[in-house]
Amino acid sequence: MAGAKGLFVAMIVGIFTTEIYHFIVKQGWTIKMPEGVPPAVTSGFVALIPSFVIFILVGLIASVLKATTGLSLTEIIYQLLQAPFQQIGDTIPAMCLLMFARGFLWFFGIHGTNVLGPISDSILLPNIEENARYFAQGVSAYDVPKIATSSFISQFVSIGGTGVGLAFVIAVIIISRSKATRKLSIGATPGVLFNINEPILYGVPIVLNASLIIPFLLTPIVLIIVGYIAMGTVLVPKTVALVPWNMPVLIGGYLSTGGSFRGVILQIVDVVIATLIYLPFIKLNDRVEAKINVAEKQKSQRIDKGAKMRWEIN
């Protein structure tokens, strides 16, 4: 049993073997090389004993488990841990919590997608793999079991990047009076179409911007609910293909749902809803930005006036 279902066991074995390796090296149970031997050669010999011990130990554990249970280590871990997580993960509350946490980290400038990747991938990748397997066997995309998949998140929730960056750009173009914000958003549009929104996250910025935190965190949650309703009521096919996260909008909606234009329509509906959510907050951000600019201008004038007075006195 390989593929996405082996993610949990890969993480667990990786941690386990790393700790054993570190323990053996720390105890000094390694091959000692004489002085003058190049470091590259020494490091290779240092790894021999720990690697041999790990190989034997993991092999013994896997053999004992197979002999006593009839299952491989991967199958046991999957049944005990990953399968329950997948069942919990394929729910609206779990997906909302995941996207809220991802957006919350991004708001503070931390790459939430990468930080939470091991958790989300262990749930979402096996789900899309399961859907794809059913679809390949002839099951309709409407009838495959899972809604929460990696393609669902990338194509119907994070449209234009975390926080629905495409909707932010459209809202700015529609309503913003800030020349700087408009120029930056227009310049970031090509990247946003491929789900790359770092220019607006750090350029506008959205990061640490209290005026935009509510729509940035709320919009993905709303789109999760919309997606679950649309797919759960069989209005739109579920995702059955693992498409790249940076697949352009509309194309990604079509491909991920097995070639259905209903996926395209759902993406359009999602963007419209998200844009409507962003509009009032873009106006708020404009007002806050205008006040900050006025305050900075007044401060600059006071500094210039003070400098002029000191020059005249001198």
Image (cartoon, grey):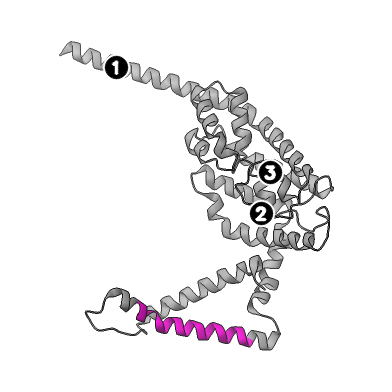
Tag shown at residue 304: 1
Precedes in sequence: disc 1 or disc 2: 2
Q: Position of residue 264 (x, y in %)?
A: 74, 41
Disc 2 secondary structure class: helix
Is 168 on the left or on the right of 180, as rendered?
A: right
Disc 3 from disc 1: Cα separation: 55 Å
Answer yes or no: do the residues labelled 3 and 1 have beta carbons within 8 Å?
A: no
Q: Is 45 within the magenta?
A: yes
- Category of crowding for the residue at label 1, using alpha-carbon neighbours closer than 10 angstroms: few (below 14), some (14–19), many (at least 20): few
Q: Is residue 105 above or below residue 73?
A: above
Task: Tell me the number on the disc at residue 150.
Answer: 2
In the picture provided, is 98 more to the left or to the right than 287? right
Q: Which residues are magenta?
A: 44-64
Q: CA distance from mark 1 to mark 2?
A: 55 Å
The residue closer to the viewer here, 124 or 155, is: 155
Which amino acid is tagged 3? Ile
Which residue position is annotated with label 3?
A: 251
Instruction: Give the residue displayed 29% in from the left and 74% down from the top.
Output: 39
> Can you say whether 81 is above or below 32 in the image?
above
Q: CA distance from mark 2 to mark 3?
A: 16 Å
